[in-house]
Amino acid sequence: MCRLWMRLGSRVISLWGRLYSKLEISLAVEEVQKPKKLKKGGILYARVSKAPPRSAGKLALSLQGIKLKNVDGLFSKSDPFFEIRRTYEGAGGGSWSPVYRGKHVKNNLNPKWEPASIDVNALCDGDLNRRIQVAVFDHEKDGKHNPMGAFDTTVNELVKSVGGKFALKKGSKTYGTINVDECKIIGAETSSVVQPPSAPAAATATAPVDTTSYQPPMMPVPVPVADFGNMNLGGQPLPVPVAPPKKPTFVDYISGNCDLNMCVAIDFTGSNGDPRRPGTLHHFSPHGQMNGYEKAISAVGSIVAKYDSDQQFPVYGFGAKYGGVVRHCFQVGNSKEVHGIKGILDAYKGVFKTPLIMSGPTVFTEVIQLAATQAKQRYQINPLSYSILLLLSDGAVTDVEATKQVLASVADAPLSIVIVGIGNADFSAMQFLDDFETRSGVNRDIVQFVQFNAHEHNKTSLTRATLEEIPDQLVQFFHTRGIMPQADSNFSASKIVIDDYNEEADIDLSMDYGSDGEIALNGDVGCYIDNSYEAGIGDLHVIPPPSAPSGSAPVAASVPTQPFTFQVQVPPNVVSGQQIQVAHPHTGQPLVVAVPAGVPPGGVFTVSA
């Protein structure tokens, strides 16, 4: 699961309509940030980050301001409100970003704000000792709120400071104090909160502690700094502890020049049924509805394909008879590779225009061996190359033992295999794939089986189920071989360049401020995102919301296809005409571009890819 943060800069009255299209591609990515200039002023900062695995609960917080300094002039009083802020790691994550904003209290320098309930994961990723900030502002209707001071703290410090107070600072000056009336965590799941071991809690009036039975642990006597030089160390220097190297993540490899390749294998055995008959698995509806194979190709393939550098995909078939011979691995399409997801679907449909006879048995071994061989060949050329075989089948494999042997023989290949079961067949015989690693003795799991019907009506669930093991499989393969992600010496990911508003490609959703300063969408303009399987084939589809009568079908309006553009900042000591290597913002793949004439070091130019 990922969470989406949006930070609004200055006055925002329009929304970046292509935000969904640009950020949805982040498979298991821990964090992506994208800033965008808006049509009528302001900047929208969108951040997608990987959510913690467990809930750290809610922070119940009540604050009160005492003798705050008035910043609203001589003839009026400030209208204070407070924000709780955090920082983010990674690109552009150094500044404070608001997580919670309370309501303002009018004309009051001793405000008692309404109790706040804040998601602890959103605030500090469950780390109660992570630095956060409490900032107070004087509310203004135009959104340009005046700072009244701030202080840094942690969740742990706030919890321990109930009944205490913090000095509100603005620079070196004190602008009042903030009392903590209440602060506690509610509903945290076990082992979700990160905090160091602490001593037994101090006695309180409601929960007295038996101090006679508690014995504090024995601690070594500390050595005063002045006497440290007199200690006899036997002439040996003190060992310097070395932190173990951090294991790279999937994101590190994808952004570190890892070349991810996808190939597809499709089951054409007779058990799929006569494709001319409605209801069979390979039937093509005259009304344009996708069959199970098309949905799986679109839903799963469209996600993995985003990371393929050249968008060229080998497509294979198995289980069909040509010239009286059953083929367990044959080329689908007129070329060895097809372009894009649409190319895969076109090649798949084109098979039924050839003189094939759907036959059997169901044999995976040849397509797995071919995929592993090609993956190893790419690996010999580029040690950071990794492949994914998407194998679609309607039934259990015929020879389980032969399949096990092949999987064991290719476990050392830079390959993951996702087998998607299509239809209503009994797939219980395929469960050996789930515990193949344990039973076979192979120390690397490379295969995942998913039954399509369990996720057919939920594209997001299907994608998550089929791809959930790939990040760990990829990391394990490279890390156990000592292959680390590459660093890009010419491009700094921290230099986030704000994209200009694009009149043709960006969809404007009008936004207005209410009387209380809250931002709201105008009621006369609206749209929703088409999350159907068909939407994954091309670009983003935005559909007008259904209108009365309810039976009328919405009319799709496709966004004009635009080449993807992004901006690059020229590194120091690089001049016009010189080539530099940059990372593609979507795929992480390296691109070599030349600095245009007239762009100096530190300047910005646009790249289309």
Image (tube, grey):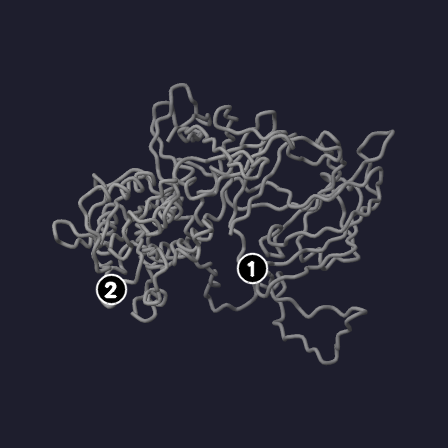
Query: Where on the picture, by quarter, is residue 515?
Result: top right
Residue 90 point in image, percent of width and height: 50, 44
Structural crowding at the residue carrying mark 2, measured as other residues with C-alpha within 10 Å and reported as few (<14), some (14–19) or many (≥20)? some
In this view of the protein, which residue sits in the foreground, 556 or 373? 556
Going by the numbered disc 1, the residue's amino acid type is Arg
Q: Is mark 2 on a helix, strand or loop?
A: loop
Q: Which marked residue is nearer to the observer: mark 1 or mark 2?
A: 2
Residue at the extreme top of the image, as rendered: 598
Residue 165 placement, left or right of 295:
right
Question: Residue at left 46%, top 66%?
Answer: 235
Residue 487 point in image, percent of width and height: 38, 43
Structural crowding at the residue carrying mark 1, measured as other residues with C-alpha within 10 Å and reported as few (<14), some (14–19) or many (≥20)? some
Residue 241 point in image, percent of width and height: 48, 61
Residue 398 bears which disc, if any? Answer: 2
Q: Earlier in the sequence, mark 1 or mark 2?
A: 1
In this view of the protein, which residue sits in the foreground, 430 or 98? 430
Going by the numbered disc 2, the residue's amino acid type is Thr
Q: Can residue 83 be spotted in the picture?
A: yes
* Residue of label 1: 54
Residue 101 placement, left or right of 64:
left
Query: Where on the picture, by quarter, is residue 513?
Result: top right
In this view of the protein, which residue sits in the foreground, 303 or 430? 430
Cα separation, mark 1 vs mark 2, equals: 40 Å
Where is 369 relative to 378, above or below? below
Where is 325 relative to 506, above or below? below
Residue 306 point in image, percent of width and height: 38, 42
